[in-house]
Each structure stands twice: as structure tokens, then as C-alpha cells.
Image (cartoon, rainbow, N blue to C red):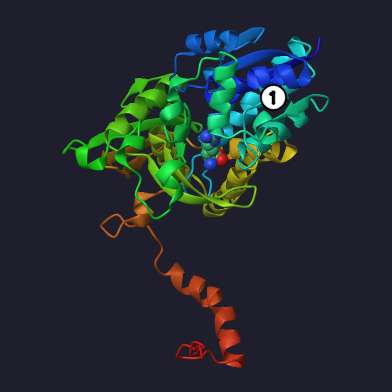
Amino acid sequence: MNRIVLAYSGGLDTSVAIPWLAEQFGAEVVAVTMDLGQGKELDAVRERALATGAVRAHVLDVREEFARDYLLPALKADAIYEDRYPLATALGRPLIARKLVEIAEMEQATAIAHGCTGKGNDQVRLDVSTRALNPTLKVIAPARIWTMNRPDEIEYARKRGIPVPATIDSPYSTDSNLWGRSIECGVLEDPWSEPPEEIYALTKSPAACPDTPAYVEIDFAQGVPVRINGVDMPLIELIEALGSIAGSHGVGRIDMVENRLVGIKSREIYEAPAAVVLHAAHRELQKLVSPRDMDRLARDLSVRYADLVYNGLWFTPMREALDAFFAQVQTRVTGTIRLKLFKGDCHVVGRKSPMALYEHALATYDAGDLFDHKAAEGFISLFGLPVELSARRVPIARTPAPVAQEG
Ligand code: ARG
């Protein structure tokens, strides 16, 4: 029997996809729903999949794997897309693809299917990841093939007696997991309009935040956050606890216009309270313990890492090689970062580490200064030599060149 494994969220698109796939391909549809920490009751989703015509509905708790094998490497790499987006959705997709492939192999299916449209990044991530893991599997994206709009889909569902999900009234499209939440569509498509307060679910409005700041101390061991305010925590718990503290202080809201892989610019709102705080802390600690040249290289490679994750290239030798580099850097990223969370802002206010390259005796302007001031003279003499040589041959203009005028 022809069998298709569908990534099923319980929303309208993937609910309509169940009978659609069965009819178009004469196939049995096996639904797979995963818990990546989106905080949604998944038993109800399983029931809906079966009520909608799936022959089987698998529900997988992949939070542990998600945190350990995807979020942690991204944190170690300081992977932030276009300076702002911590990549929650983008990091989830390779894991989802991996599980779909596993279930497809177990179910002896010939294809996997997903609810992505032809306009987003997610289709690329799922498709490319699937091909990396098992190129014999076909990938079907019903929403890319059918020509139904939302009212058509509702009609399609009604005709077949399929329960229409309650979320259908929301003008927004959202995606969430342990690392954060994205909100798109509706009024947000106008990059000039301020996001309405109602779209946020993980963060308080800064105006409604407590009048006293929260201080959070995060301990890292070799790049891994292990303790908050002195309390040891497993990674998932730590992310959740930190998320609620930061969210209650309004930290983690992101409003940006980003470059999608498919060529368009899109306005995106994110909430990622835990990710924003952890990245700020990790970056600070890594800087404290890393020699200057290595820190600069790590920064450059962070951009490459973020692009790679965003572009769906997780299962590639390039990502493995970058992970190896960042793993080496992490060997010294042990210490504590203290942050102040206050009305939407998150600032590092303290840092310490047994591996710190900061040396008080070298930095101080007070008594106890051990810096060799006299050595600076010789250093500058040679450092400035090429500048002087060049300026002797071709004098440097002392006033700025006039800027070309129009017209
Ligand atoms: N623009 C973000 C990204 O590409 C968010 C995508 C949200 N995906 C979704 N299916 N709602 O990672």
C-alpha cells in the first residue's frame, strides 16, 4: 500500500492535507506530531488526525533531543540570523525532517508531506534535510500544489465532515517551540504598523513590567548553561525557567524585516525570552575567555552558522566542521554572567571566569599596575612605521574630500 507520512500540526492546512493526500495519491496517510516545547496539548491533536482520516497518528516528545542536539550547538555558535533572530523555527525543521524520515522508514512509506507554502523558508529546510537523510523519499507539499485559499479549505473540510480547528479565526500565523515563537500575517505585513499587544504570548509589555529589575546569574560549563542563580538545572528546565523570568520582564521581543531564502523581505515578530538572554550571556563569557583573534573569527563564523541554519543546510559537512570549531572554542567557556532584566531590556552587568583573560593588574589605573608603560613606546614605533612610510610618499588629505553633489 502506498503510504505517506505527514508532519501534522493539527491546524487547518495539515488537517485538509490528510484527505487531500489520500484522494490525490490513493495513499494511506500516517500523521506525525512532535513536541518541541510548543506548550500545546498533543493528545487532542492525535485524536484530530485520526478523526480526519489518518490511519495512524504518532506523537513524539523530541524536546530533549531538540535542546541537546540543535539548540545547544546553535547557542555555542552564537547563531543569530541578521543580528536579531535566534532561529527557533529554523532549528526545529531539521529535527522534524529527521523524525519524519525515521517514521517513514519504519512505516515503509514512499513519501513524506508537510504543510508549508511555496513562499517560506520551512519548505526548503524540510525538503533539503530530507534529501540529505534519505534521498529515495519523495517530498510532497500539498499547499504548494492545491490552489485552495482559506475559505476553500474550510469548505473542503466541511464537505468531508472534518472538524475545523478553532484557531481558524486568528489573523496571525504563529510557530513556537522551546527556543521561541514567531508571529506573521495580518496587520504585521505592514512594516510601518506597530505590533498590537495581543500578538504576544511569552513576553509582558515593558509598560506592564515590574518596577524593580530582576538579576539573573547564569553559570556555563564549557559553553553549556548549567545553573541559574546557583541552582543546577537540566537544559530544558533551565530554558523554560529563564524564559518565564525574562518574559515577565518583557525581554525577548524582536521586530524585524528579514531576508528570506526565497528572495523576499518579510516582516517578522519574534518572542524569544530565554534565547535572547542565553545568547547575550554566552557571547559575553566567550569574549571574556577568548584571545582576540579567536573571538573575531568566532564572530565571523557565527554569521556563517546562522545563515546555514536559516537556509536549511543543517545536515551538511559545513555545519559539522563549524560545530567542531565552536566545540574547541567552548573548552574555555566556563564561568558566570550576571544580567539585569528590566522593562524589556537585558544587560550584562557582571562577568567572572577562572579562564578569564582579563587581568586586573594589567588593566588597572590604580595602585598595583603591572603594565609595562615603557614598552609601549617601542611597540608604537614599529606599529606606526608603515603608516608613516606611506604618508611620506603620498601625503594624506587633511580635510575630507568633498561629497559629490546631485544635479
Ligand atoms: N521567518 C522565520 C523563519 O523562516 C519564521 C518562520 C515561521 N514558520 C511558520 N511555519 N509559521 O525561520
Near-viewer residue (56 or 314): 56
Q: Is residue 303 left or right of residue 333?
A: right
In the picture shown, does residue 233 fall above or below 358?
Answer: above
Residue in the picture at 50% in, 88% down: 406
Task: Tell me how many marks there are.
Answer: 1
Q: Can see residue 76?
A: no
Residue 103 horizontal/vertical position (percent): 70, 14
The outermost residue toward the left is 211
From the image, which quarter does the N terminus lie in? Answer: top right
Quarter location, residue 206: top left
In the picture shown, does residue 399 fall above or below 71?
Answer: below
Residue in the picture at 62% in, 40% down: 121
Quadrant holding ligand 1?
top right
Residue 308 horizontal/vertical position (percent): 64, 43
User: Does the residue tagged 1 have its C-beta within 8 Å of any atom of ligand 1?
Assistant: no
According to the picture, the residue beneath numbered tag 1 turns out to be: 113
Near-viewer residue (271 or 31): 31
Amino acid residing under circle 1: Ala
Dot 1 lies on which element?
strand
Q: Is residue 297 left or right of residue 102?
A: left
Residue 399 horizontal/vertical position (percent): 45, 91
Residue 113 horizontal/vertical position (percent): 69, 24
Residue in the picture at 24% in, 35% down: 214
Q: Is residue 92 left or right of residue 129?
A: left
